[in-house]
Image (tube, rainbow, N blue to C red):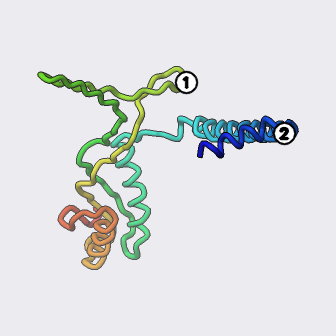
Amino acid sequence: MENKLTDAINYLKNNDSERIKIIVAVGLIGILLIGVLDMFSNASKDIDDDTVQTVSSEDYADEIEQKLTEIISSINGVGECKIMVTLENSSENVYATDVQSDSDTDSSSTSEEYVIYDSNNDEEPVLLKEYYPKILGVTIVCSGGDDVVIKETVTDTVTSLFNISTNRVSVSKIKE
């Protein structure tokens, strides 16, 4: 390995025109790599902060209710329907943390701090994951709620959508 390196250095020393070509080629490759890396780093920085949105539990429940109303009301025989969704708790955010551990022969200590980034002069913690609330139950009041077949179809639809048991779904006839 050392001989090859020495031979390459000696070759560059002896051939001036070849040496210049190699130096220019290496320089151009370096500039090209820097440009490509700069493009990729700028692309990740250009992500708009508005794309990361946190949704409140109430907004989440409202959105689910609206989508579920569209789906359930499109089932044949259901008719007009109103839906209420209950959630287990609010959403949960998991932020990036930096953990530092110090240990001696006699004691040990651990400190944990949130990882912060500067976004438009506002310091914010780095969000890793957002867990939406778990759906506890769904109540559906609809025109066809007194028909056994409609009740079963609606219950099956809701249980398959939210992976909840049938005892957590209530289907009733709407008051006329």
- Kindly identify the residue that appears in the image at 38 percent across and 60 percent down: 68
107 vs 175, nearest the viewer: 107
- Kindly identify the residue that appears in the image at 53 percent across and 41 percent down: 51
Horizontal side of 101 relative to 121 (left or right) equals: left
- Kindly identify the residue that appears in the image at 40 percent across and 41 percent down: 55
134 vs 26, nearest the viewer: 26
Q: Is mark 1 on a helix, strand or loop?
A: loop
40 vs 51, nearest the viewer: 40
Point out which mark residue 15 bears: 2
Q: Which amino acid does label 2 sit on?
A: Asn
95 vs 73, nearest the viewer: 95
Residue 10 in percent (x, y) is at: 74, 38
- Kindly identify the residue that appears in the image at 37 percent across and 54 percent down: 65
Quarter holding residue 45? top right
Horizontal side of 86 relative to 30 (left or right) equals: left
Look at the numbered discs 2 and 1 and tell me whether their residues touch, using CB distance below 8 Å: no
Q: Which amino acid does label 1 sit on?
A: Asn
In the image, residue 131 above or below residue 109: below
Q: Judge whether residue 2 can be spotted in this image.
A: yes
Residue 143 in percent (x, y) is at: 33, 68
Q: Judge whether residue 176 can be spotted in this image.
A: no
Quarter holding residue 32? top right
Mark 2 neighbour density, 10 Å: few (under 14) some (14–19) many (20 or more): few
Which residue position holds label 1? 120
